[in-house]
Protein backbone atom coordinates (compact mmCIF):
# COMPACT_ATOMS: atom_id res chain seq x y z
CA UNK A 1 0.00 0.00 0.00
CA UNK A 2 2.81 2.40 0.92
CA UNK A 3 4.62 2.01 -2.41
CA UNK A 4 2.12 4.51 -3.86
CA UNK A 5 3.18 7.27 -1.48
CA UNK A 6 6.27 8.46 -3.38
CA UNK A 7 4.18 8.73 -6.57
CA UNK A 8 1.52 10.71 -4.64
CA UNK A 9 4.22 13.05 -3.31
CA UNK A 10 5.58 13.68 -6.83
CA UNK A 11 2.06 14.27 -8.19
CA UNK A 12 1.27 16.67 -5.32
CA UNK A 13 4.39 18.71 -6.10
CA UNK A 14 3.35 18.86 -9.78
CA UNK A 15 -0.14 20.08 -8.77
CA UNK A 16 1.35 22.76 -6.49
CA UNK A 17 3.71 23.86 -9.26
CA UNK A 18 0.80 24.26 -11.68
CA UNK A 19 -1.26 26.16 -9.07
CA UNK A 20 1.62 28.61 -8.62
CA UNK A 21 1.59 29.54 -12.30
CA UNK A 22 0.33 33.13 -12.85
CA UNK A 23 -2.27 32.23 -15.51
CA UNK A 24 -3.72 29.19 -13.68
CA UNK A 25 -7.16 30.81 -13.13
CA UNK A 26 -7.74 31.41 -16.85
CA UNK A 27 -9.12 27.89 -17.26
CA UNK A 28 -11.63 27.73 -14.37
CA UNK A 29 -12.51 24.04 -14.88
CA UNK A 30 -8.85 23.04 -14.69
CA UNK A 31 -8.27 25.38 -11.72
CA UNK A 32 -11.16 23.82 -9.73
CA UNK A 33 -9.87 20.33 -10.53
CA UNK A 34 -6.36 21.24 -9.32
CA UNK A 35 -7.71 22.86 -6.13
CA UNK A 36 -9.75 19.72 -5.34
CA UNK A 37 -6.72 17.49 -5.99
CA UNK A 38 -4.57 19.68 -3.75
CA UNK A 39 -7.17 19.51 -0.94
CA UNK A 40 -7.54 15.71 -1.29
CA UNK A 41 -3.79 15.01 -1.38
CA UNK A 42 -2.58 17.50 1.28
CA UNK A 43 -3.48 15.33 4.36
CA UNK A 44 -1.76 12.27 2.79
CA UNK A 45 1.37 14.25 1.91
CA UNK A 46 1.52 15.83 5.36
CA UNK A 47 1.20 12.44 7.11
CA UNK A 48 3.76 10.83 4.75
CA UNK A 49 6.34 13.57 5.40
CA UNK A 50 5.85 13.15 9.16
CA UNK A 51 6.17 9.35 8.71
CA UNK A 52 9.45 9.72 6.79
CA UNK A 53 10.76 12.09 9.47
CA UNK A 54 9.86 9.60 12.23
CA UNK A 55 11.66 6.80 10.31
CA UNK A 56 14.72 9.06 10.03
CA UNK A 57 14.53 9.79 13.79
CA UNK A 58 14.65 6.03 14.47
CA UNK A 59 17.80 5.67 12.33
CA UNK A 60 19.43 8.68 14.03
CA UNK A 61 18.66 7.36 17.52
CA UNK A 62 20.01 3.88 16.67
CA UNK A 63 23.21 5.42 15.25
CA UNK A 64 23.62 7.53 18.39
CA UNK A 65 23.18 4.46 20.62
CA UNK A 66 25.94 2.65 18.73
CA UNK A 67 28.40 5.54 18.94
CA UNK A 68 27.61 7.06 22.34
CA UNK A 69 29.15 5.79 25.57
CA UNK A 70 27.83 8.53 27.88
CA UNK A 71 24.98 6.97 29.88
CA UNK A 72 22.88 10.15 30.03
CA UNK A 73 23.05 10.61 26.26
CA UNK A 74 22.18 6.94 25.75
CA UNK A 75 19.06 7.33 27.93
CA UNK A 76 17.99 10.35 25.87
CA UNK A 77 18.55 8.40 22.64
CA UNK A 78 16.47 5.48 23.99
CA UNK A 79 13.60 7.86 24.83
CA UNK A 80 13.74 9.43 21.38
CA UNK A 81 13.85 5.97 19.78
CA UNK A 82 10.76 4.86 21.75
CA UNK A 83 8.85 8.06 20.82
CA UNK A 84 9.79 7.75 17.13
CA UNK A 85 8.68 4.07 16.99
CA UNK A 86 5.33 5.04 18.54
CA UNK A 87 4.93 7.87 16.01
CA UNK A 88 5.70 5.50 13.12
CA UNK A 89 2.97 3.08 14.29
CA UNK A 90 0.40 5.89 14.65
CA UNK A 91 1.29 7.41 11.27
CA UNK A 92 1.18 4.00 9.55
CA UNK A 93 -2.40 3.56 10.78
CA UNK A 94 -3.31 7.12 9.74
CA UNK A 95 -1.84 6.58 6.25
CA UNK A 96 -3.68 3.28 5.81
CA UNK A 97 -6.97 5.10 6.51
CA UNK A 98 -6.03 8.04 4.25
CA UNK A 99 -5.21 5.63 1.42
CA UNK A 100 -8.55 3.79 1.61
CA UNK A 101 -10.55 4.18 -1.63
CA UNK A 102 -12.64 7.34 -1.26
CA UNK A 103 -16.39 7.18 -1.72
CA UNK A 104 -16.94 9.34 -4.84
CA UNK A 105 -20.16 10.71 -3.30
CA UNK A 106 -18.56 11.91 -0.03
CA UNK A 107 -18.25 15.54 -1.11
CA UNK A 108 -21.81 15.76 -2.43
CA UNK A 109 -24.84 17.55 -1.03
CA UNK A 110 -27.68 15.29 0.06
CA UNK A 111 -31.40 14.87 -0.21
CA UNK A 112 -32.76 13.83 3.18
CA UNK A 113 -36.09 12.01 3.40
CA UNK A 114 -37.80 11.19 6.69
CA UNK A 115 -41.07 9.21 6.76
CA UNK A 116 -43.19 8.32 9.77
CA UNK A 117 -43.47 4.53 10.07
CA UNK A 118 -45.39 2.35 12.52
CA UNK A 119 -47.05 4.20 15.39
CA UNK A 120 -49.52 6.71 13.92
CA UNK A 121 -49.37 10.23 15.40
CA UNK A 122 -46.51 9.27 17.72
CA UNK A 123 -44.41 8.17 14.70
CA UNK A 124 -45.14 11.50 12.96
CA UNK A 125 -44.04 13.44 16.07
CA UNK A 126 -40.84 11.36 16.17
CA UNK A 127 -40.20 12.03 12.45
CA UNK A 128 -40.46 15.78 13.17
CA UNK A 129 -38.00 15.43 16.08
CA UNK A 130 -35.53 13.57 13.85
CA UNK A 131 -35.81 16.32 11.25
CA UNK A 132 -35.07 19.00 13.88
CA UNK A 133 -32.12 16.90 15.11
CA UNK A 134 -30.61 16.86 11.61
CA UNK A 135 -31.30 20.59 11.09
CA UNK A 136 -29.45 21.40 14.33
CA UNK A 137 -26.57 19.12 13.37
CA UNK A 138 -26.39 20.71 9.90
CA UNK A 139 -26.25 24.18 11.48
CA UNK A 140 -23.35 23.06 13.71
CA UNK A 141 -21.53 22.00 10.50
CA UNK A 142 -22.46 25.30 8.76
CA UNK A 143 -24.53 23.48 6.16
CA UNK A 144 -27.69 24.90 4.61
CA UNK A 145 -31.03 23.04 4.91
CA UNK A 146 -33.88 23.75 2.53
CA UNK A 147 -37.25 21.96 2.65
CA UNK A 148 -38.34 20.43 -0.66
CA UNK A 149 -41.69 19.03 0.47
CA UNK A 150 -43.49 18.60 3.77
CA UNK A 151 -46.59 16.64 4.72
CA UNK A 152 -47.59 17.57 8.28
CA UNK A 153 -49.87 15.72 10.68
CA UNK A 154 -52.46 17.66 12.64
CA UNK A 155 -50.58 17.70 15.96
CA UNK A 156 -47.24 19.12 14.84
CA UNK A 157 -45.76 15.91 13.51
CA UNK A 158 -44.41 15.15 10.02
CA UNK A 159 -45.87 12.29 7.99
CA UNK A 160 -43.09 12.89 5.49
CA UNK A 161 -40.42 15.53 4.88
CA UNK A 162 -37.84 15.95 2.13
CA UNK A 163 -35.01 18.45 2.39
CA UNK A 164 -31.85 19.41 0.55
CA UNK A 165 -28.75 19.64 2.77
CA UNK A 166 -25.98 21.67 1.12
CA UNK A 167 -22.44 21.80 2.46
CA UNK A 168 -18.95 20.34 2.34
CA UNK A 169 -18.90 16.64 3.23
CA UNK A 170 -22.66 16.39 3.93
CA UNK A 171 -22.92 12.90 2.43
CA UNK A 172 -19.68 11.66 4.03
CA UNK A 173 -21.15 12.25 7.51
CA UNK A 174 -24.88 11.67 7.07
CA UNK A 175 -24.74 8.59 4.82
CA UNK A 176 -24.75 6.33 7.90
CA UNK A 177 -28.18 7.68 8.95
CA UNK A 178 -30.20 5.74 6.35
CA UNK A 179 -32.42 3.10 7.91
CA UNK A 180 -35.17 2.60 10.49
CA UNK A 181 -34.97 4.72 13.66
CA UNK A 182 -37.03 3.48 16.61
CA UNK A 183 -38.38 5.47 19.58
CA UNK A 184 -39.54 3.99 22.87
CA UNK A 185 -41.52 6.28 25.20
CA UNK A 186 -44.85 6.96 26.86
CA UNK A 187 -46.93 9.08 24.43
CA UNK A 188 -48.66 12.18 25.84
CA UNK A 189 -51.99 10.70 24.78
CA UNK A 190 -51.35 7.47 26.73
CA UNK A 191 -53.28 7.58 30.03
CA UNK A 192 -52.07 4.19 31.31
CA UNK A 193 -48.39 5.15 31.25
CA UNK A 194 -47.44 2.30 28.91
CA UNK A 195 -44.32 2.58 26.77
CA UNK A 196 -45.01 2.53 23.04
CA UNK A 197 -42.56 1.78 20.24
CA UNK A 198 -42.81 3.84 17.05
CA UNK A 199 -40.56 4.09 14.00
CA UNK A 200 -39.47 6.51 11.32
CA UNK A 201 -37.47 5.75 8.19
CA UNK A 202 -34.58 7.96 7.14
CA UNK A 203 -33.11 7.94 3.63
CA UNK A 204 -29.97 9.89 2.74
CA UNK A 205 -29.27 10.20 -0.98
CA UNK A 206 -26.34 12.00 -2.60
CA UNK A 207 -27.44 14.82 -4.87
CA UNK A 208 -26.92 13.60 -8.41
CA UNK A 209 -25.52 15.93 -11.05
CA UNK A 210 -26.78 15.91 -14.62
CA UNK A 211 -23.58 14.10 -15.62
CA UNK A 212 -24.42 11.30 -13.11
CA UNK A 213 -27.98 10.70 -14.31
CA UNK A 214 -29.50 11.65 -17.64
CA UNK A 215 -33.27 12.18 -17.46
CA UNK A 216 -35.31 11.96 -20.66
CA UNK A 217 -38.00 14.62 -20.25
CA UNK A 218 -40.32 12.49 -22.43
CA UNK A 219 -40.35 10.01 -19.52
CA UNK A 220 -41.63 12.69 -17.13
CA UNK A 221 -45.23 13.70 -16.58
CA UNK A 222 -45.83 16.99 -14.72
CA UNK A 223 -49.12 17.88 -13.03
CA UNK A 224 -49.73 21.21 -11.31
CA UNK A 225 -52.09 21.75 -8.38
CA UNK A 226 -52.79 24.26 -5.66
CA UNK A 227 -50.52 24.06 -2.64
CA UNK A 228 -52.09 23.33 0.72
CA UNK A 229 -50.99 24.10 4.28
CA UNK A 230 -49.12 27.04 5.78
CA UNK A 231 -47.55 29.38 3.30
CA UNK A 232 -49.07 32.83 3.48
CA UNK A 233 -51.54 34.51 1.18
CA UNK A 234 -50.28 32.95 -2.04
CA UNK A 235 -51.12 29.41 -0.94
CA UNK A 236 -54.36 28.07 -2.47
CA UNK A 237 -54.55 30.97 -4.95
CA UNK A 238 -52.14 29.77 -7.65
CA UNK A 239 -51.34 26.38 -9.19
CA UNK A 240 -47.71 26.50 -8.04
CA UNK A 241 -47.33 22.97 -6.60
CA UNK A 242 -45.88 20.32 -8.91
CA UNK A 243 -46.36 16.55 -9.05
CA UNK A 244 -43.72 14.76 -11.13
CA UNK A 245 -44.29 11.16 -12.28
CA UNK A 246 -41.37 9.26 -13.80
CA UNK A 247 -43.16 6.86 -16.15
CA UNK A 248 -40.49 4.09 -16.50
CA UNK A 249 -40.03 3.63 -12.72
CA UNK A 250 -43.37 4.87 -11.38
CA UNK A 251 -41.59 7.25 -8.97
CA UNK A 252 -43.88 10.12 -7.92
CA UNK A 253 -42.53 13.32 -6.35
CA UNK A 254 -44.63 16.23 -5.09
CA UNK A 255 -43.11 19.62 -4.42
CA UNK A 256 -45.06 22.59 -3.09
CA UNK A 257 -42.59 24.44 -0.90
CA UNK A 258 -41.85 27.26 -3.34
CA UNK A 259 -44.38 29.84 -4.55
CA UNK A 260 -42.93 29.53 -8.05
CA UNK A 261 -44.04 26.60 -10.20
CA UNK A 262 -40.69 26.68 -12.02
CA UNK A 263 -38.71 26.38 -8.75
CA UNK A 264 -40.90 23.51 -7.57
CA UNK A 265 -40.36 21.74 -10.90
CA UNK A 266 -36.59 22.21 -10.55
CA UNK A 267 -36.61 20.81 -6.99
CA UNK A 268 -38.73 17.82 -8.05
CA UNK A 269 -36.23 17.01 -10.81
CA UNK A 270 -33.37 17.17 -8.27
CA UNK A 271 -35.15 14.61 -6.08
CA UNK A 272 -35.90 12.38 -9.08
CA UNK A 273 -32.26 12.53 -10.18
CA UNK A 274 -31.14 11.52 -6.67
CA UNK A 275 -33.68 8.65 -6.54
CA UNK A 276 -32.57 7.28 -9.93
CA UNK A 277 -28.93 7.60 -8.90
CA UNK A 278 -29.71 5.68 -5.70
CA UNK A 279 -31.45 2.91 -7.70
CA UNK A 280 -28.37 2.62 -9.92
CA UNK A 281 -26.10 2.40 -6.88
CA UNK A 282 -28.30 -0.27 -5.29
CA UNK A 283 -27.87 -2.41 -8.41
CA UNK A 284 -24.09 -2.04 -8.12
CA UNK A 285 -24.15 -2.87 -4.38
CA UNK A 286 -26.25 -5.99 -5.03
CA UNK A 287 -23.65 -7.13 -7.51
CA UNK A 288 -20.89 -6.92 -4.88
CA UNK A 289 -20.11 -9.89 -2.67
CA UNK A 290 -21.22 -9.82 0.98
CA UNK A 291 -17.58 -9.82 2.08
CA UNK A 292 -16.94 -6.45 0.50
CA UNK A 293 -19.85 -4.73 2.19
CA UNK A 294 -19.08 -2.46 5.10
CA UNK A 295 -20.00 -3.82 8.52
CA UNK A 296 -21.49 -0.48 9.49
CA UNK A 297 -24.48 -1.03 7.25
CA UNK A 298 -25.48 -0.87 3.66
CA UNK A 299 -27.74 2.15 3.83
CA UNK A 300 -30.67 -0.23 3.42
CA UNK A 301 -33.84 1.65 4.36
CA UNK A 302 -35.33 -1.46 6.03
CA UNK A 303 -32.35 -1.98 8.36
CA UNK A 304 -33.12 -1.14 12.01
CA UNK A 305 -30.17 1.04 12.93
CA UNK A 306 -30.89 3.01 16.11
CA UNK A 307 -33.16 3.12 19.16
CA UNK A 308 -34.02 6.26 21.16
CA UNK A 309 -35.23 5.11 24.59
CA UNK A 310 -36.79 7.99 26.60
CA UNK A 311 -37.41 6.25 29.98
CA UNK A 312 -33.71 5.30 30.15
CA UNK A 313 -32.44 8.49 28.44
CA UNK A 314 -30.32 6.42 26.08
CA UNK A 315 -29.57 6.12 22.38
CA UNK A 316 -28.28 2.79 21.02
CA UNK A 317 -26.78 2.32 17.57
CA UNK A 318 -27.30 -1.38 16.83
CA UNK A 319 -24.73 -1.62 14.02
CA UNK A 320 -21.74 -0.84 16.23
CA UNK A 321 -23.37 -1.68 19.59
CA UNK A 322 -22.79 1.85 20.87
CA UNK A 323 -25.00 3.10 23.72
CA UNK A 324 -24.89 6.73 24.89
CA UNK A 325 -26.87 8.04 27.87
CA UNK A 326 -27.41 11.56 26.52
CA UNK A 327 -30.67 11.38 24.63
CA UNK A 328 -31.54 15.08 25.00
CA UNK A 329 -28.24 16.41 23.62
CA UNK A 330 -28.35 13.93 20.71
CA UNK A 331 -31.91 14.99 19.77
CA UNK A 332 -30.66 18.59 19.93
CA UNK A 333 -28.23 17.76 17.13
CA UNK A 334 -25.10 16.64 19.00
CA UNK A 335 -24.35 13.72 16.67
CA UNK A 336 -20.55 14.00 16.52
CA UNK A 337 -19.78 11.07 18.83
CA UNK A 338 -22.17 8.71 17.01
CA UNK A 339 -21.03 9.76 13.53
CA UNK A 340 -17.31 9.64 14.42
CA UNK A 341 -17.78 6.13 15.89
CA UNK A 342 -19.61 4.98 12.74
CA UNK A 343 -16.87 6.41 10.48
CA UNK A 344 -14.17 4.69 12.58
CA UNK A 345 -16.03 1.35 12.46
CA UNK A 346 -16.52 1.68 8.70
CA UNK A 347 -12.81 2.41 8.17
CA UNK A 348 -11.79 -0.53 10.39
CA UNK A 349 -14.08 -2.86 8.40
CA UNK A 350 -12.65 -1.63 5.08
CA UNK A 351 -9.06 -2.05 6.34
CA UNK A 352 -9.86 -5.61 7.49
CA UNK A 353 -11.37 -6.41 4.07
CA UNK A 354 -8.30 -5.04 2.29
CA UNK A 355 -5.97 -7.15 4.43
CA UNK A 356 -8.04 -10.29 3.75
CA UNK A 357 -7.96 -9.79 -0.03
Image (cartoon, grey):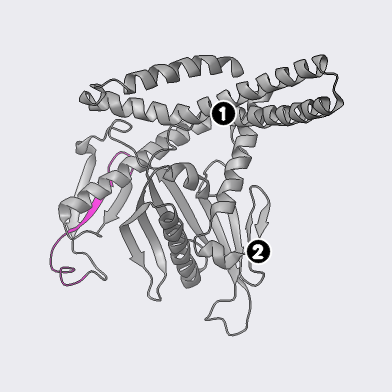
Indicate left or right for 100 with 205 as reference: right
Q: Position of residue 135 (x, y in %)?
A: 41, 59
Residue, x 82% and y 25% (percent of image)?
Answer: 74
Looking at the rendering, which quadrant does residue 163 occupy? bottom left
- View extreme (bottom): residue: 191
Residue, x 59% and y 52% (percent of image)?
Answer: 337
1 or 2: tag closer to the N-terminus? 1
Q: Which residue is mark 1?
A: 47
Q: Which residue is mark 2?
A: 325
Indicate left or right for 149 with 44 as reference: left
- For label 1, the crowd category at 10 Å Cα-Cα, with few meaning under 14, some 14 to 19 and many 20 or more, is some
In-front residue for pair 111/344: 344
The magenta stretch spans which residues?
232-250
Q: Residue 236: within the magenta?
A: yes
Q: Position of residue 67 (x, y in %)?
A: 80, 14
Residue 179 vertical placement versus 27 (above, below): below
What is the quadrant of the N terminus in the image? top right
Looking at the rendering, which quadrant does residue 38 occupy? top left
Amino acid sequence: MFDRLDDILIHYEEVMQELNEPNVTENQTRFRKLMKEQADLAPIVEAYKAYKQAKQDIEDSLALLEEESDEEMRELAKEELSDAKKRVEELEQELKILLLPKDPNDDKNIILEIRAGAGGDEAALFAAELYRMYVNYAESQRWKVEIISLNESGIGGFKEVQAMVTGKGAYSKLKYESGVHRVQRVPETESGGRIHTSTATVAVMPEAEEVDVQIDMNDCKFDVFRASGNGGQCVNTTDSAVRLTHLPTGIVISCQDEKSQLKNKDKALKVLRARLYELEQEKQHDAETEARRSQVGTGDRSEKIRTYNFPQGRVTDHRIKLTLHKLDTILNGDLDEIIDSLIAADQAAKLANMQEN
